[in-house]
Amino acid sequence: MIDHDRLFKELLTEFFTEFLELFFPDIVAYLEPNSISFEPKEIYTDVTAGEKYEADLLVKARFREQESYFLIHLEHQAQPQADFGRRMFRYFARLYEKFAIPVYPIAIFSYNSPKLPQPNFHRVEFPDTVVLEFNYQLIQLNRLNWRDFLQHQNPLASALMAKMNIAPEDRPKVKSECLRLLATLRLNPAQMKMISGFVDTYLQLNTAEEEIFQAEIASFEPVEIEVVMEIVTSWMQQGIERGLEQGRQEGRQEGELAVIMRLLNRRIGTVAPELQEQIRQLSLTQLEDLAEALLDFADTADLVSWLESHPKG
């Protein structure tokens, strides 16, 4: 499973200034560049719902040429959520109450659907008056055209294009263009790895797409090809390492299964095919538990009872 929130939080924390430059240049104009600091997590408990909410990213900054400060609250959303605006207002109200300085709220939606424009406000109104209208900035990635970001010399552009509105036939092209842009930026190895890993996570290509991707890379300038091929090679190496680890786990599980079947045959006699199939469905941890438990089995009924109390994992 992909931990979307962790990936986005790491990316936005590392490239927060670049995020503002890409989407909110007006903030950059009145923000003191060297004043940015990341505040500790703010966790709120909703007593009525019995749930805890954690603000994703909270940044404190100073107004340019002033002594006054403000907060930027950035919330990432990987799944659609009903009444999200109310949640943003709740964060705003509590942050504003606690810190007593202006709060600039931003939400970034990274899910694939729905693609209809999502609201960026929370309103409380009556037939005769509007009591409250709270607005926040909203970046809905699935409504942004990746082509509009090709010319931005910005590492966030090279990463977030992978989550923008992409036609299925454009997937290999987008992945290659993400890397082409990345190859032109002067980033340290850790930053390169972070962005290239982000792109590879969200643009996994099938065999046919991979061929198109390789053809796109071949058309790059020689300097770009060299950098991009280093990235692609690292992806391949990581894939091999993951495959080897999976193979080791599978080999260990097969070995454990073979030993258990031999022990069961000695302990309770030949195991029926349907019971053998149930045992094959067990996880490695469950197989290890069964290997210990079977020493106390007297007959097939004991095995059946154990399997019933340990559904496949």
Image (cartoon, grey):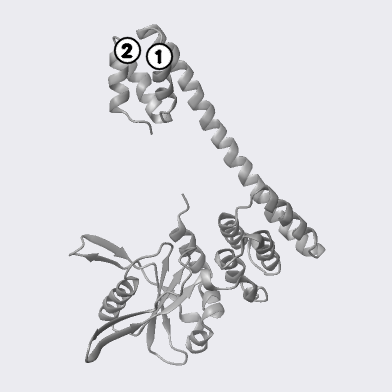
Looking at the rendered structure, the kind of residue marked 2 is Thr
Looking at the rendered structure, which numbered label has been put on residue 300? 2
Q: Which residue is drawn at 29% across and 81% down?
A: 96
> Residue 194 is drawn in which quadrant?
bottom right
- Report the quarter where the C terminus lies: top left
Query: Label 1 belongs to which residue?
Result: 272
Instruction: Please state if 128 lies on the left or on the right of 252 as rendered.
Output: left
Residue 290 horizontal/vertical position (percent):
36, 22
Between disc 2 and disc 1, the foreground one is 1
> Residue 219 is drawn in which quadrant?
bottom right
Q: Which residue is drawn at 59% across and 67% down?
A: 161
Q: Which of marks 2 and 1 is nearer the N terminus?
A: 1
Say whether marks 2 and 1 touch (CB < 8 Å).
Answer: yes
Label 1: how many Cα within 10 Å (few below 14, some 14–19, many 20+): few
Looking at the rendered structure, which numbered label has been put on residue 310? none
Residue 16 horizontal/vertical position (percent):
50, 73
Label 2: how many Cα within 10 Å (few below 14, some 14–19, many 20+): some
Looking at the rendered structure, the kind of residue marked 1 is Ala
Instruction: Work out whether residue 165 or residue 257 is closer to the camera in this orientation and state it.
Output: 165
Instruction: Work out whether residue 62 or residue 163 is closer to the camera in this orientation and state it.
Output: 163
Residue 71 horizontal/vertical position (percent):
38, 80
Q: Residue at x 31, y 19 (%)?
A: 304
